Image (spheres, grey):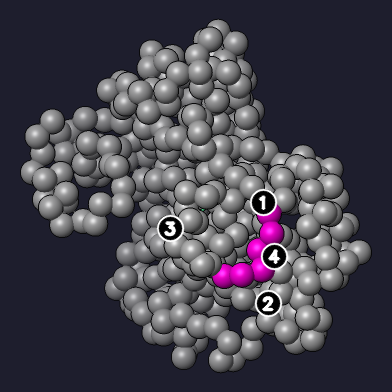
Amino acid sequence: MANKWIDEAEHALLHTYNRYPIVLERGEGVYLYDTDGKQYLDFAAGIAVCGLGYGHRAYTEALKAQVDKLLHTSNLYYSIPAAEAAGKLAKAAQMDRVFFTNSGTEAIEGALKAARKYAFTEQSGRFEFIAMEHSFHGRTMGAVAVTGNEAYRTPFEPLIGGVRFATYNDLESVRAQMNEKTCAVILETLQGEGGIHPIDPAFLAGVRRLCDENGVLLILDEIQCGMGRTGAMFAWQDYGVKPDIMAMAKAIGGGVPVGAFAMTEKVAAKSLAPGDHGTTYGGNPLACAAVSAVLDIFEEEHLLEHVREVGAYLEEKLDELAARRDSVKERRGKCLMQGLELAVPVGEVIARAQEEGLLVISAGGNVLRIVPPLVITKEHVDEMIGKLDKAL
Ligand SMILES: *Cc1c(COP(=O)(O)O)cnc(C)c1O
């Protein structure tokens, strides 16, 4: 399909993505439209980012109002949006201290630095991280160092040292890697990029216990599975296991680039202090106005209850589809973060879904990933199932 925008983009953008041949131009509700005016039902949400869909009135009005007032101040000064967003996010995340970043990978970098600084202050001699195989934590050198995927790591070695890998959902493998040098364990509460692998609640509780017994911090990466996607504000809140440090991004800004890492007071008191960490853009007034608006809308529209209800319906419909189609081996996931392990090439299914006017993405080896806007209705689920059934 000839499109001048594709030619222009291919001419100048660094070739780091094999993009789909679609130029998205605008969005409305949970639908996106390309430059030919073709409509797509969006079950990808810009990779689990656009939780409120597109053109949500209260959200866009809050952003427009902030654009007219003030976009940027730097972190040398206070701002009203940062003050408000930090308080609301700390409350929602049940954490005491928040640091705003521009992305998920920066939230991970900050979380790793926070853990190392805590160990440094304690003079514990601890510096090692235990990370999980098949994990994904982002693309900067520190984040890649704790990402359990050789293809993402090897070309960039040497990465930061002191990282050991354990097997997700295997407590003994974590115990085997832990020693007197271990500073923190880092894991996703529900593995996303690695292929949608839910956590075993007993494993998470076991890791928490192991950390407590050994003076080790627990860092949870809630960048993809957080912000309501699994039916809790943050996925760990369903399991009664609280992290010491957590990383957030993707849906917290509803589409404005913003991330955050947060920690308990116990960690903060011995961790990053003035001069240890910073960012020019991070937590600027526009980004924080977005976070604030998103958190307000969660409360006003009772979004968590909505996610649990429509999430249960999505699971039921995907299970029916999986039972009826040999091309689907297994469904995995929680609420509005779902994966279908396929017996046919996932790329071909995604392309056929696009022809049908449905956007879905992949994860891990051969997994179809379903991470729609959180505001989808049961009717949208039915429409998606119809299109996906045809694509399969
Ligand atoms: C997307 C993602 C990241 C990286 O976030 P970016 O904003 O792309 O830097 C880190 N961890 C998890 C679990 C993610 O899904």
Q: Under tag 2, what secondary structure? A: helix
Count of numbered labels shown in the rendering: 4
As drawn, the label of residue 68 is none
Residue at 71% from the left image edge and 45% from the top image edge:
168
Q: Of label 4 and label 2, which has the lower sequence position?
A: 2
Query: Which residue, given by chain and number where applicable, does mark 1 sit on?
Result: 132
Q: In this view, does 334 lie to the left or right of 12?
A: right
Query: Which residue, given by chain and number where applicable, does mark 4 sit on?
Result: 129
The residue type indicated by label 4 comes to Phe
**Distance from Cα at disc 2 to Cα at disc 3:** 25 Å
Query: Which residue, given by chain and number where applicable, does mark 2 sit on?
Result: 116
Image coordinates for residue 25, horizontal then vertical, percent: 22, 44
Residue at 43% from the left image edge and 26% from the top image edge:
346
As drawn, the label of residue 155 is 3
Q: Which of 371 and 181 is in front in this view?
A: 181
For label 1, count other residues whose C-alpha is less than 10 Å away and answer few (under 14), some (14-19) or many (20+): many
The residue type indicated by label 3 comes to Pro
Q: Of label 1 and label 3, which has the lower sequence position?
A: 1
- Where 95 sits versus 196, above or below? below
Q: Of label 4 and label 3, which has the lower sequence position?
A: 4
Which mark is in front, 2 or 3? 3
**Distance from Cα at disc 2 to Cα at disc 1:** 18 Å
- Magenta stretch bounds: 160-165
> Disc 2, disc 1: CB below 8 Å?
no
> Disc 2, disc 3: CB below 8 Å?
no
Q: Nearer the viewer, residue 291 or 151?
A: 151
Q: Under tag 1, what secondary structure? A: strand
Residue 220, quarter of picture: bottom right
**Distance from Cα at disc 4 to Cα at disc 1:** 10 Å
Q: Which of 25 and 136 is in front in this view?
A: 136
For label 4, count other residues whose C-alpha is less than 10 Å away and answer few (under 14), some (14-19) or many (20+): many
Q: Under tag 4, what secondary structure? A: strand
